[in-house]
Amino acid sequence: MLALTVRPGVSGSASVREMPEPPEADGSVLVDGLAMGVCGTDIEISAGEYGEAPPGEDVLILGHESLGRVREAPADSGLSTGDLVVGIVRRPDPVPCANCAVGEWDMCRNGRYTERGIKALHGYGAERFRLHPEFAVRIEPDLETVGVLLEPTTVVAKAWEQVERIGARAAWHPHRVLVTGAGPIGLLAALLGVQRGLEMHVVDRVTEGPKPQLVADLGASYHAAPVGELDLCADIVIECTGVPSVVFDVMGRNAPDAVVCLTGVSPVNRTLSVDAGGLNREIVLQNDVVFGSVNANRRHYEDAGRALAAADRQWLERLISRRVSLADAQEALTRRPDDVKVVIDLHTAG
């Protein structure tokens, strides 16, 4: 079968090649790949920045944002031939830690988890892959054109869950939300905020292309000005850029008792001057909370599925700004100015 592979640690090694059929050890559910979403993680792995091949192998099949159709499934799996499924990314560590033992593998404490397409497990960027039933999430048939958005939606489904849990520490009635970054994660974070009936504001640096209109069509407000120039006094901030200056700006400009969720991963070895004392004073005296959120567990996949099912289908389809075939998959790993979400269509290979 054809698959999109890289040699971890080797920049520019991404290629489409023949790979062995997925082994039964990967799971009893055989899936025909339909689509793979491309995100910054895939681009960074293809640039040799990180990634880990399965033990004993020198290549890694990319792809953690998946969509497939069940070809074969055991009678007791809860799945049937023809079902649309998305594969969960993370697998619990073998020990396991306390969180992995109860299905909260997104909160693994010892770091011995594995991840499909990222860390020690082949990903979903192939014509076929296998899943254990407990790591296969069935989605509704009418989500076929947008189902590949499920995994990125899980990231913000978890973020919103955590924000609301933290907010429940007090008599908290949030009204205004600031999302920084209008990439797929930021736009999906805004979608889930709109679904909660909150006043949404999205900040991004671009003034042209599809992003401003996508935000407007949600009923949210789009801002191209720097965060430091806005006077929004947000109750909730969901930071999706990882840009250090933006991270510090949102931590110091929000309402009392605010909750700031950081989902963007910042690059290392970049420094900037900040008034750390002033920032600490603001956070302490206003009872603010700043926390990080990454990955998702099955509960978040199910929450994300409900969010996508409730969303406007045409709006979701517009998030997918470019589709390429598996044969041309390398094109998807190069960003273009108007890209929002790039998707590789696995069933059009060759």
Image (spheres, rainbow, N blue to C red):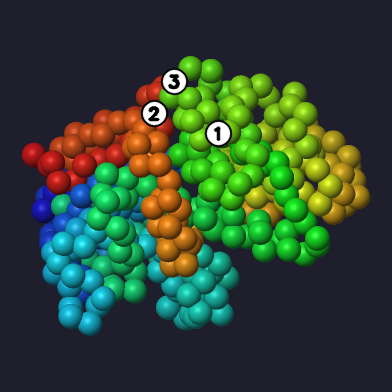
- Which of label 2 and label 1 is nearer to you? 1
Badge 1 element: loop
**Which residue is disc 3 drawn over?**
209
For the image, the number of numbered tags is: 3
- Which of label 3 and label 2 is nearer to you? 3
Q: Nearer the viewer, residue 68 or 350?
A: 68
Q: Distance from label 3 to label 2 (Cα)?
A: 9 Å
Q: Distance from label 2 to label 1 (Cα)?
A: 22 Å
Q: Distance from label 3 to label 1 (Cα)?
A: 18 Å
Q: Position of residue 203 (x, y in %)?
A: 61, 30
Measuring 18% from the left and 70% from the top, which residue is drawn there? 80
Badge 3 element: loop
Q: Position of residue 176 (x, y in %)?
A: 70, 41
**Which residue is disc 1 drawn over?**
219
Measuring 61% from the left and 29% from the top, which residue is drawn there? 221
| Dot 2 and dot 1 residues touching (CB under 8 Å) | no
Of the image marks 2 and 1, the number of the one nearer the N terminus: 1
- Which of label 3 and label 1 is nearer to you? 1
Which three-letter amino acid code belongs to the residue tagged 3? Gly
| Dot 3 and dot 1 residues touching (CB under 8 Å) | no
Which three-letter amino acid code belongs to the residue tagged 1? Gly
Measuring 30% from the left and 31% from the top, which residue is drawn there? 322
**Which residue is disc 2 drawn over?**
339
Badge 2 element: loop
Q: Position of residue 69 (x, y in %)?
A: 19, 58
Q: Position of residue 57 (x, y in %)?
A: 25, 60
Dot 2, how many residues are within 10 Å of its Cα: few (below 14), some (14-19), or many (20+)?
some
Q: Is residue 164 left or right of residue 84?
A: right
Residue furthest left as drawn:
350
| Dot 3 and dot 2 residues touching (CB under 8 Å) | no
Of the image marks 3 and 2, the number of the one nearer the N terminus: 3
